[in-house]
Amino acid sequence: MREIEIIIMATIIAMLTILIVSTRGRSLLRVFFLHFSLSQKRRIIIVIMVISVLALVLQISWKNSTPHEKLVSSMHLVSNDSLLQSLGATQIQALKNIDVLRIDTSISFKKIRPEIAYVIPSVIKSFQVIAKKYFIPEIASIPQNNSIVFHTTQTNISTSQGLRLKHLLQKKLGTDYAISLRKDKKNFQFLKIEYRGQPWNNEKLLSVPVLEAAVAEKVEPALLMAWVQATSHFNIGYKDDNGNQGLLALDSGSGFEQLRVGAHLLHQRLEKHINVQDALASIYLGEESLRRKEWWKDPLAKAWVEQILVNAQDYRQRGLFLTH
């Protein structure tokens, strides 16, 4: 609901409360009712009608709120779901598997927060920019789940280059991250990155799995992200009225696997239909229903498709797109 509507509703409720609770307010109401010669029964009917009108205005205001407003509201959802919190470890393992990051087997990274793990690709790129060559950075330690320490001496980063690396990363990552350099007794230099901001909400946490699924299935990540938002509002435990569960409420796939299933389905429908609107409508209604009727005459299907298109554009403007 928009702020102006909240102010208006609060003002009306406050005025009614004053009229009912205060002695002067009740006196004014009695004068009003006596002036129009209203019986007790009619007085009750008028009060009920006023309350009903207020409730109707409130309901209409909520229904007419834009998809963007609902998107902003859902962005505040923060989850402690173990699957979402495991994204940090998954990200580090993926980087290790493709041999762009080294980490000693004695270092546990199972509980590292995604807010730290997600910025490691930027750290790797910054290392290479400063060193002006390709090498594989090495994690020295993970002292806490919100911080990570990299070797710089072993990768031939000098003290002056270390300072440049620190400033570059601080500029890239922003004020939520604290970047520091330190040396141990052997004069080895280390770079520490610590996340000091608020825990990320589900929307941010899911951006990387959505991007990975979109890249794998060659669909636009903004469109896939908007589909997740319209279906489950980023709630990984979502369940619809038909009993389907998950981020996209599909009848197959669970957890993040459903993102890949959904991206594959989206790719198929985009290939089959002449435009994005028809492709999305076929997902909402099913292919059989789509063939039997004009989907844009179904108000629910039309609203769902329009919401996804609006939210997808919002994600594009916020930077969720692929560069070639």
Image (spheres, grey):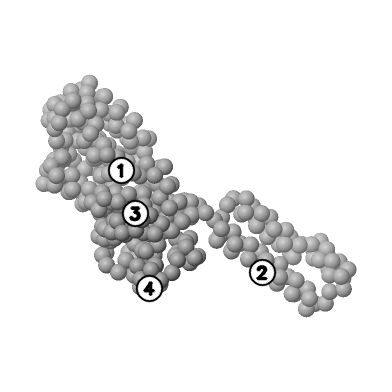
Secondary structure state at the residue bearing disc 1: loop
User: In this rendering, which labeled residue sits more in front, label 2 or label 1?
Assistant: 1
User: Closer to the N terminus: mark 3 or mark 4?
Assistant: 3
Residue found 21% across the figure and 35% down from its top: 124
Q: Is residue 174 visible?
A: yes
Q: Choose between 185 and 242: the one closer to the eye.
A: 242
Secondary structure state at the residue bearing disc 3: helix
Q: Residues within 10 Å of mark 3 (few under 14, many from 20)?
A: many
In which image quadrant can residue 274 be found?
A: bottom left
Q: Which residue is mark 4?
A: 242
Q: What separation in Å lies between label 2 and label 3 (alpha carbons)?
A: 40 Å
User: In this rendering, which labeled residue sits more in front, label 1 or label 4?
Assistant: 1
* In the image, farthest residue toward the top: 160
Q: Which residue is mark 3?
A: 224
User: In this rendering, which labeled residue sits more in front, label 3 or label 4?
Assistant: 3
Q: Which residue is mark 1?
A: 322
Q: Residues within 10 Å of mark 4 (few under 14, many from 20)?
A: few
Q: What separation in Å lies between label 1 and label 4 (alpha carbons)?
A: 34 Å
The amino acid sitting under disc 4 is: Asn
Q: Which residue is mark 2?
A: 52
User: Closer to the N terminus: mark 1 or mark 4?
Assistant: 4
Residue found 22% across the figure and 23% down from its top: 161
Q: What separation in Å lies between label 2 and label 1 (alpha carbons)?
A: 49 Å
